[in-house]
Every structure is written in C-alpha cells, then in structure tokens.
Image (spheres, grey):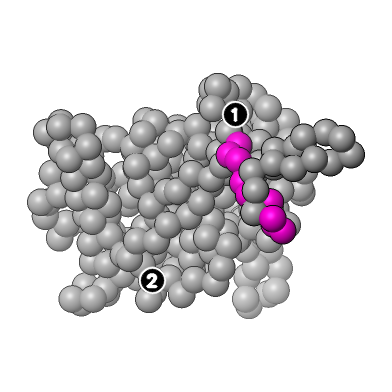
Amino acid sequence: MPDARKTLQVLNDEWSSCTACELGARRLALKNPFVEGTGCTRSVMFIGEGPGRFEEQEGAPFIGPSGGLLRDTLKKFQFTDYYFTNLVTCRSCEPLIDLATGLPRMRKGYGGKPAEPMLKDSVPLPTQIAACRPRLLEEIYIVDPVLIVTLGGAAAEALLERHVTITKERGSTVHVNIPGFTERAVLTDKKKVWGHNVRGEYVRPTEQNMVRYLVLPTLHPAYVLRKVGDQGANSPIRQFGDDIRRAVKIYERYLVEALGIEPTSTSDADLSTLGGEHDDEELAEARP
C-alpha cells in the first residue's frame, strides 16, 4: 500500500536493487545506475516507457535525443514545474540487426575496449511493466501531480490498463485512479450497513482509498523525431507541441484558480523550430 509518509528517496532505495524481472537482473549484472524519477512534486508528471542508452549510462531520465525534444519543448514554454519518470526504471533493449547479413551491428570500442553490439530500445514486456507497476503507482502518489502526461501508446496503456489508440486519443484528458494510503468505510454487500457481527466480533468493512488523477496522453517523442521531416499542419511534431501546450495551460489554470498564483511559464510560444535530424538506435522503429 502506498505510504504518504514515505519520501521519494526511500522509495528509490527500496527499488534500486530490484530483480523482480529480467531488466533489473541485467542492470545489476552490468552495474548500471538505477534511473530514478526526478523533478518537482505537485507538478506535471511525464511518464515514458523506460530508460534508453544515454539514460542507462548517466542514471537520469530523458537525457537522450527524445528527452532532448521534450526538454526543448518545455523550455520554449519557459516551463520548469515538471517531474520525469518511466514505466520501468531499467533499460529494455535488444540487438540491432544488420538486414544484409542478419548479424548484430557492432559499435567500435574505444580506449582499447572491444567492439560491442549496438542495441535498440524495445517496449518493455507486460510482465516487466507489471513487476515495476507498484513502484510507479507509489511514485505517482508521493509526487501527487496536478497532471500526468503519458508519452507514447505503451505508457498510456500501462497506466490506464486498457487499449489506447494513441493517434486518436492523444491530446484528450482522461482520469485514472491510483491507490491511496488511507482506507475508507464501505457498506456491506447484503444488508448495506456500515458494520456487522462476525463470530461475536463487530466488523466495520473498509476498502483502500483511491486518488483520482488527470491524464493527458501524447505521442512518444522518439516517434516524433523519426517523423520530424513531416511539417504538415497535422504532423506528429505539431501534434506533440500542441499537447504539451495544453498540458502547460492546464497547469497554469491550476496555479491561478486553485492557488491564486500567477504562472511564470507561458503557453504562448513559437514551436516552429522544434525537432531536427537524429541518427541513433533509440529512434529505430520507434512507435507512437
């Protein structure tokens, strides 16, 4: 059960040595850092699929090419109240195969190191996402975001626990219930009363309290970068920018109406210079 008294550091310490799935076992075997979430609480939480090559090397989320697009977009809006995390905290990847030879593509080793296979990021398996889900739910509860933005169809499906056609549902807000710390009293099924006797003992049934959060799904930034050559009116780069703009507007409205605070960010920004060509295995076969 999520614990409101727990800090993010305690949560990360609890999960930093997790081997509940193959991803954690691989990370520990390679002695790679634990990629924990980072940012501001009570802000806009961005949830991706998982760490890529750069994130795995540095131990920080969203620092590769797709993370760069997200950060650049937020910078355009002068927006700093955000929190970054992922469905899984360990990298999910597989060898990048040369179609001509059928063999793994190799990256040259430097400093006397041997060549090593090039890897491409892959969507975590359902079992891997399920193994990390308790951590994600507890992280959401501790961060307590004003808005959750899921990046890509896999992130949206995992959080909402249903099929999501991201190209149709992106930009529209939905709600998700996250388990809370406290419990609330409930009526009994049969007599609809708040308590009853069970073998001489008076029992008051309860259930775990749920906390409702607003969710805005959008495209995966790696997919957006791969389609960056499309500059049409309804292109992925424009859709992505519009969705982030809406997220900023929702947060600005929260600051004004709920807290009486004038926002320092701006949802009025020129996004025409976003994007750029990237040649990186992170973008290979990237899905929306």
Q: Is residue 6 magenta?
A: no
Residue 17 shown left or right of residue 9 in the figure? right
- Tell me where the magenta segment starts and ends, as one range: 183-191
Percent position of residue 7, x then y: 54, 22
Q: Nearer the viewer, residue 196 or 118?
A: 196
Residue at which label 2 appears:
169
Residue 121 shown left or right of residue 40 in the figure? right
Indicate which disc, 1 or 2, sits on the residue closer to the N terminus. Answer: 1
Q: The disc labelled 1 sits on which kind of residue?
A: Asp
Residue at 68% in and 27% down: 14
Asked if 97 appears above or below 184 in the picture, the reply is below
Q: Secondary structure at mark 2?
A: helix
Residue at which label 1 appears:
3
Residue 23 shown left or right of residue 76 in the figure? right
Q: Nearer the viewer, residue 241 or 145?
A: 145
The numbered disc on residue 223 is none
